Amino acid sequence: MPFTSEEQAKSAFDKKNPYKYGILPILVVIKNDTGKALRLNLETELVDVQNHRLESMPPSDVVLFDGAANKNWSAIPKPLPIPLPSHNKGPLDTWEIEGRAFTAKLIPPDESASGFVYFNSALRPESYLYVNGIADAASGKEYFSFEVPFEDRKP
């Protein structure tokens, strides 16, 4: 679920609205009803109707971010320079960004995990979230990838 409104942002991020600063936060909730433990190495992409794909940003980059939404999905965002300057904290330098990010690596049977993934983008009509990297913890067998449509996506 994308968090784009002020009300949604306030419930998750208190006084900061990441969407206002060009960051689209999407709440990911995974419930494990397989009866087996799940190992997670999540890879998430935001995909638009033209099949342009945008990888999620690490939360540590979001707290440094001070730009505008990515207007060109076909351009791969450049990684931040290493080493990162310590004095260039962005307007989203708040504990909620990293503290509420999706970080689970294992989900026991009948449990769930949730958190946010972040994209340098505006929410586009008919876009969806592509999720990959869910496997059976014991066997290592990968489960299928998932496409999670947003409410405005046409069937």
Image (cartoon, helix red, strand yellow):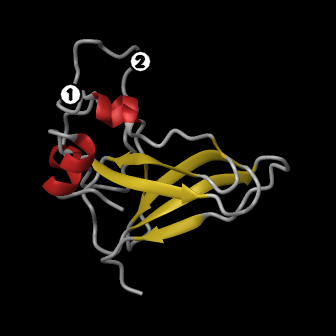
Q: Is residue 135 left or right of residue 126?
A: right
Q: Nearer the viewer, residue 58 or 3?
A: 3
Query: As shown in the figure, which amino acid type bears the numbered disc 2?
Result: Ile
Q: Is residue 54 left or right of residue 88?
A: right
Q: Which x, y percent locates residue 78?
A: 38, 36
Can residue 62 be seen in this snapshot?
no
Q: Quadrant of the C terminus?
A: bottom left
Query: As shown in the figure, which amino acid type bears the numbered disc 1?
Result: Gly
Point out which mark residue 8 bears: none
Gap in angstroms between the C-alphas marked 1 and 2: 17 Å
Q: Is residue 33 left or right of residue 18?
A: right
Q: Does residue 87 lie above or below 32 as drawn?
A: above
Residue placed under numbered mark 1 in the picture:
90
Point out which mark residue 82 bears: 2
- Residue found 22% across the figure and 33% down from its top: 92
Density class for disc 1 (Cα within 10 Å; few <14, some 14-19, many ≥20) is some
